[in-house]
Amino acid sequence: MKTIINTTKAPAPIGPYSQAVATGNLLFVSGQIALDPQSGELVTSDIPSETKLVMENLKAILTEAGADFSSVVKTTIFLKDMGNFAVVNEIYGSYFTDNFPARETVQAAALPKNVNVEISVIATLA
């Protein structure tokens, strides 16, 4: 059985997918981009602002599901330009205190809405 997770505190999906799906004790959070949940506008003025909004969108979905970043076991980071890795990594890392999740970071030729960063997570649920 699966449960669809949805919150207005994160951007509504821009396609045929859910913000997150819980099944058993796992939560699969769809890739988030820097869409402002209130205005629906993209925030791509600079990579730090863009990355922070991506992480805040992930946080809102995790919270809605009853989880937080300490529950995350796996992340995937997609970057338009691997040259932004250090900045993204620093901001990403500030959301985790210890027991870091497994992760891969991939440079992608193109991302939705031409953003610079997209991040998805898998978390455990209590």
Image (cartoon, grey):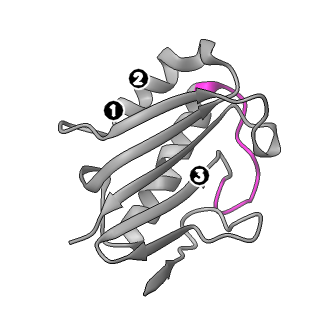
Which residue is drawn at the image coordinates 61% and 17% (left, top)?
A: 82
> Which of the 4 image quarters holds residue 90?
top left
- Residues rendered magenta in the picture: 36-47
Q: Label 1: which residue?
A: 94
Mark 1 vs mark 3, foreground winner is: 3
Q: Is 42 drawn above or below residue 44 in the view shown?
A: below
Residue at which label 2 appears: 90
Quadrant in which the N terminus is drawn:
bottom left
Q: Secondary structure at mark 3?
A: strand
Which residue is located at x 67 percent, y 68 percent? 12
Q: Measured from the top left, where is residue 25 in percent x and y?
A: 28, 72
Q: On the picture, is 95 further left or further right than 112?
A: left
> Helix, strand or loop at disc 1?
loop
**For the residues marked 2 and 1, what is the alpha-carbon distance in whole angstroms?**
6 Å
* Residue 45 within the magenta-colored segment of the rendering: yes
Q: Are marks 2 and 1 in contact (CB under 8 Å)?
A: yes
Residue at screen point 48% across, 15% down: 86
- Using the rendered view, name the quadrant where residue 122 is placed: bottom left
Local packing at callout 3 (Cα closer than 10 Å; few below 14, some 14-19, many 20+) is many
* Residue at the disc numbered 3: 31
| Point 69% across, 66% down: residue | 13
Badge number at residue 13:
none
Secondary structure of residue under mark 2: helix
Q: Residue 6, image x and y in percent? A: 54, 76
Which numbered disc, 1 or 3, marks the residue that appears first in the sequence? 3
Q: Is residue 114 positioned above or below 40 on the image?
A: above
Circle 3: residue type: Gly
